[in-house]
Amino acid sequence: MYEASDLRKGIKIEINGDPWTVSEFDFVKPGKGQALYRCKLKNMLTGSTMDRTFRVAEKIGKPDLEEKEMFYSYADGDFCVFSDAETYEEMRIGKDKLGNQFYFLVENAECKVLFFNGRPIEVTLPVFIEKVIADTEPGARGDTATNVTKPAKLDNGYELAVPLFVNIGDRIKIDTRTGLYSERVSKA
Amino acid sequence: MSAKPEIIRRLSSLKLRLEKRAAVFSAVREFFNSNAFIEVTTPVRIRAPAPEPHIVAVPSGDLFLRTSPELEMKCMLASGYGKIFQIGPCFRKNEKGRLHREEFTMLEWYEAGADYLKLIDFTRKLLEFISMKVHGSPRCVFRGCEIDFAKAEIITLKSAFAKFAKRNLLEIVADDKFEEVLVTDVEPALPKDRPVFVKDYPAKFAALSRLRKDDPEFAERWELYLGGVEIANAYSELVDGREQQERFRKAQAWKKYSGEGIYPENKDFTDVLGHGIPECAGCALGMDRLAMVIAGADSIDEIMA
């Protein structure tokens, strides 16, 4: 269990069986009254948020969370198959747990998988991954401007904006936190 | 040249704000002096702080750092000093946040013969005077909202709970949810374009204030809010010695039970209660928070060196 005085921004707590992240935190104390910790919480399973106050002496649940390094292997229907970096044991994780991140998975990408009560709830990809452009309008030769963009597609259908000089078959770097083009790695 | 030390970077970035803070302090002194108050200095290290639930004194050797100068200033009142004010450091253990520091600066004043309603009028004039001195205008901007010190809103705590939280104050107190509803629903909804005086606290939160004669479920106490932030706390002071001792006894019992720790009896104050304190009213105002509002700072860290 946590004490309310352990609370701070970023700490993860358990309420009614769900894990929550403390996204905002402040100490408040009305005149002559008792001190409260006023928090904004984000549900780690559903993404919903709520405001909650805790009293100083309050005990707060500590969620059973574990983070493991896992390598992405392949997609299988609605699942992605990962293998444990230590034991090589395979694990199937629903695509719904990945959201848009699914589009950035590349074979053998080293990911961090967060488990709550032994169930995977969140997959964090490497910040940068490399993908090949599957489709885009031909670029203007010699145009190196990066502030003018055009639409492009990856082989899995993900669409993003790339500079005019990027062509089909080019290998690019994508920032997985934003889903945006970062730089060109090599030409086709 | 080597990079500037962090402390120098921080302090030099605060320069404009700390100059405003100084202007607030000198305006406060000017206002009190011109209203025939005398500035007093009572000890910071004391043997016996007033026992109050939820307020914990920091030990200092075999003494304590004061949590407020209240008892010492009341001893002066009983000795014939009818209009006194003090600006100085106070200390409260474990209070750290955007609006809290363990060490802060308190302005505290007492006026013999006054009551808490007279203090509302005086305090509003004080605020307007400070704003005129610092900004040349009765208005200042805090957290994106203009506060007009020429105006004031006076609302009972009971109406504030009914209006902003749609709850009955006494029921909330009985349910032990007072602080939660106050900080979640009431404080954020208070008007921000003028000073707000929230008055008449439930007897449970009377602290050292007198109960209303016409309605003893409520105490003659108010809190001042600027931009939704609590700035000052004032009472028609309790001068009934027997009632005061009874409240201290209850507070000590609570502090013992809760593990906050009890204090020695303040013998001087007990003697003064026996001798008699004149009818009076007093106010304690957080100078750091006031300077924060007047200077348009967001947290007290931006207004304290």
Image (cartoon, coloured by chain):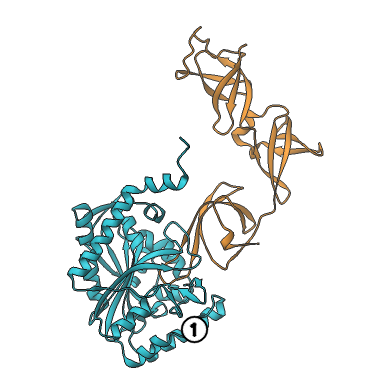
Chain colours: A orange, B cyan
- B176 vs B223, left or right, is right
Where's residue B47, x and y in %? Answer: 46, 80
State the residue in front, B28 or A129.
B28
Query: Which corner quadrant of the image does residue B81 belong to?
Result: bottom left
Specify whether B20 is left or right of A24: left
In the picture provided, is A92 more to the left or to the right than A49? Answer: right
Type of the residue with mark 1: Pro
Q: Is residue B142 visible?
A: no
The quarter of the image holding the N terminus of chain B is top left
Q: Residues within 10 Å of mark 1 (few under 14, many from 20)?
A: few
For the view shown, which residue lies furthest in the top direction? A141
Residue situated in front as seen by the camera: B35 or A141:
B35
Q: Position of residue A48 (x, y in %)?
A: 54, 49
Location of residue B194 in the rendering, given as x and y in whole percent from the top left corner = 25, 59
- Residue at image position (22%, 82%) is B113
Q: Is residue B178 visible?
A: yes
Q: Residue at x 55, y 80 (%)?
A: B256
- Which residue is disc 1 drawn over? B264
Residue A34 rendering spot, x and y as whole percentages: 48, 70
Q: What chain is tagged by disc 1? A: B
A31 vs B35, nearest the viewer: B35
Residue at the far front: name it.
B1
Please tell me whether residue A86 is drawn above or below residue B241 in the rendered image. Answer: above
- Please give left or right for residue A184 compared with residue B167 in the image: right
